[in-house]
Amino acid sequence: MTRGPLLTTAPLSGFGVEAVEASPEALPSAAGLLVPHDGEPVADVRHRPDRWALLMLLSGAVRRGVPVLAWGTGAALVGRVLGARVRPGEGEGAAEWAEAPRGATVERWRGDMPLLWRVGNVTAWADVPLPEELRAGFLTSLAQTGPRAPGSPLEAVGGEIALRVMLAAFYTRAREDELLGPVFAAHVEDWDAHLDRVTAFWVTLLGGGAAWRGNLNTVHTGLGIRGIHLTRWLALFREAAGQSLGPEAAAVLTTRAEAMGARLAQRG
Ligand code: HEM
């Protein structure tokens, strides 16, 4: 297999090898991905579409098994993608850091902060600067990485982060829709909690673990949903999926949504 370039999510100085700006298109053939410290927010990215895009890119890299070396806020970002809680740095201007993600091996601690951790093809160093031995070790390991693992349907759609971004876009449309909006307005008070539950639902459905337990029919009973609601719901879902995800990922989701829609319609 021919190797693509080493990618980076932020400009680098003094790294010693050339790395090109990371993009989703470049991921499949990338030799590796650097996620340097950039001092930008990690936990609170509500008004930062650029940060969401970066999280999605990182999620894609992890899913594809691209070797990742992250440090400083870069390590916190990757930790977040892996489901770890992000904590504020202590003291003025201190960088955010991530708790150890599930399954990670922590090789060095600083107090309760995992300073050096690894999981899969990810190596993360919570501080800056990056120690020379990690830089050198990573570059050496790039020469030895084998073929990338194929993924579950969840991985095929870009992982949980990609799903959540897509679902947020979908519910924004649904809430603004003249037909669906009032139904949601009448039943959903806490939209963050709703988004958590529907994300968990899709994660479970796509083989990402048993995070959601529930009964879709029961949830929708008594909401007054008719055929026109379902048709509109599916149309908005297709639109949102088409805009947030690549065509193959969007197809994985819409095919399943349509099948469920058909079942809900039968019940309704
Ligand atoms: C295939 C189509 C649909 C799917 C896959 C779907 C999926 C879901 C899921 C996973 C939940 C959260 C369940 C939970 O709380 O654990 C939910 C809740 C909800 N859905 Fe749907 N839904 C569909 C169609 C519709 C339609 C057409 C409407 C009409 C507007 C609708 C309105 C709602 C409302 C209002 C809730 C919140 C219920 C509550 O929390 O009281 N859904 N849906």
Image: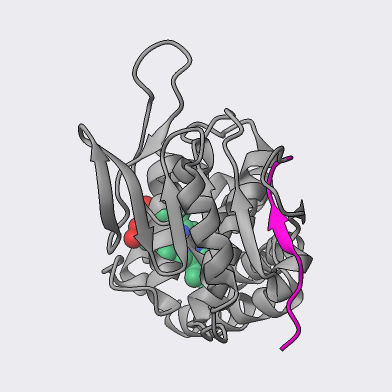
Asked if the stretch drawn in magenta spans residue 138, the answer is: no
Asked if the stretch drawn in magenta spans residue 4, the answer is: yes
Q: Number of numbered discs present? A: 0
Q: Nearer the viewer, residue 261 or 111?
A: 111
- Tell me, yes or no, if residue 180 can be seen here: no
Residue drawn at (68%, 65%), measured in percent from left and top?
Answer: 241
- Tell me, yes or no, if residue 107 can be seen here: yes
Which residue lies most toward the top here? 92
Residue drawn at (57%, 36%), measured in percent from left and top?
Answer: 37
Horizontal and vertical percent for residue 38?
Answer: 61, 33
Q: Quadrant of residue 249?
A: bottom right
Asked whether, in this view, residue 59 is left or right of residue 176, the answer is left
Residue drawn at (58%, 50%), measured in percent from left and top?
Answer: 55
Horizontal and vertical percent for residue 13?
Answer: 71, 37
Q: Quadrant of residue 17?
A: bottom right
Which quadrant, please, contains the C terminus?
bottom left
Residue drawn at (30%, 60%), measured in percent from left and top?
Answer: 104
Asked whether, in this view, residue 120 is left or right of residue 128, the answer is left
Horizontal and vertical percent for residue 82?
Answer: 41, 57
Question: Please, which colouring scheme is shown?
Answer: one colour
Q: What secondary structure do most residues of the magenta stretch adopt? A: loop
Which quadrant, please, contains the N terminus?
bottom right
Q: Nearer the viewer, residue 35 or 182?
A: 35
Q: Which residues are magenta?
A: 1-11
Image quarter where ligand 1 lies: bottom left
Is the residue 257 above or below the residue 199 in the image?
below
Which residue lies most toward the left here? 111
Is the residue 89 above or below the residue 5 in the image?
above
Asked whether, in this view, residue 233 is left or right of residue 212, the answer is right
